[in-house]
Image (cartoon, rainbow, N blue to C red):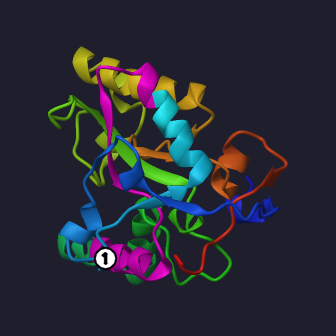
Amino acid sequence: MLNYESVKIDESGEPLVDLQQYSFILEPAYFKQGLSRDPDMFLRKSVADKLSEIQRHLSPFRFKIWDGFRPREVQHAIYEKFLGELKKKHPEWDAERLEKETGVFVTNAKNPQRIPPHATGGAVDLTLAYFDGKELDMGTGFDYFGPEAASLYFENNKKNLTVRKNRKMLREAMQAGGFSIDKEEWWHFDFGNQKWALALNKQNAFYGEIRDNE
């Protein structure tokens, strides 16, 4: 099976846009956790525009966005945090096992051969919420790193009809809008980057890594 880093990138040069320009609910998760110094959130312009259009069709619900563009230093902080949590939870695991299990959910930012999807501005972490900000029940919270976070977990296990319906509504709306889903994380979606291209059998990606946000 191919890894997504094997996909060729024809960089479009499309800029990032500040998500405050849109009508999303913004909740910068990693800033609140102290893992990022920047409370502002950005995505490539086409990604933000697509989300705005999808949201229009999902009324009365709105997108609550936890994360968009993420530089490597923030990616590394998240990786180290989760690695440390797993190490405490499973002291019997050796370093190789810890790195493998961490990598299921969080890309190692120190791997120069792999561009973290969020570093392209083409990945987004989100959910659906009512206009007052109350989230729909999706079965787990954001960044819940366990089997229940898998996109189809509740479908495959025939559990909790409400969660199944909510996840399906989100998943199908995003897919109809051109995004690819993440099998391990119900909240993560990609567009235009290598992960998206591989998932949807596209010949090339058109979003590569953004080295800064200026």
Say what amino acid the circle numbered 1 marks: Ser
Disc 1 crowd, CA 10 A, few/some/many (<14, 14-19, 20+): some
Counting from the top left corner in percent of width and height, residue 47 is at: 56, 47
Q: Write the start and end of the magenta stretch as one range.
A: 55-83
Of the pair 193 and 184, the residue shown nearer to us: 193
Q: Inspect this view and state whether residue 90 appears.
A: no
Q: Is residue 58 magenta?
A: yes
Q: Quadrant of residue 159?
A: top left
Counting from the top left corner in percent of width and height, residue 109 is at: 51, 78
Of the pair 200 and 83, the residue shown nearer to us: 200
* Element on which disc 1 rests: loop
Residue 189 left/right relative to 112: left
The residue positioned 42% from the left and 72% from the top of the image is: 97
Q: Which residue is mark 1?
A: 36
- Quarter of the image that includes the C terminus: bottom right
The residue positioned 73% from the left and 52% from the top of the image is: 1
Of the pair 197 and 155, the residue shown nearer to us: 197
How many circles with numbers are drawn on the protein? 1
Q: Inspect this view and state whether residue 85 appears.
A: yes
The residue positioned 67% from the left and 43% from the top of the image is: 199
Q: Is residue 212 magenta?
A: no
Q: Quadrant of residue 88?
A: bottom left
Residue 92 left/right relative to 17: left
Counting from the top left corner in percent of width and height, residue 121 is at: 55, 61
Counting from the top left corner in percent of width and height, residue 80 is at: 34, 80
Is 114 located above or below residue 132 in the figure?
A: below
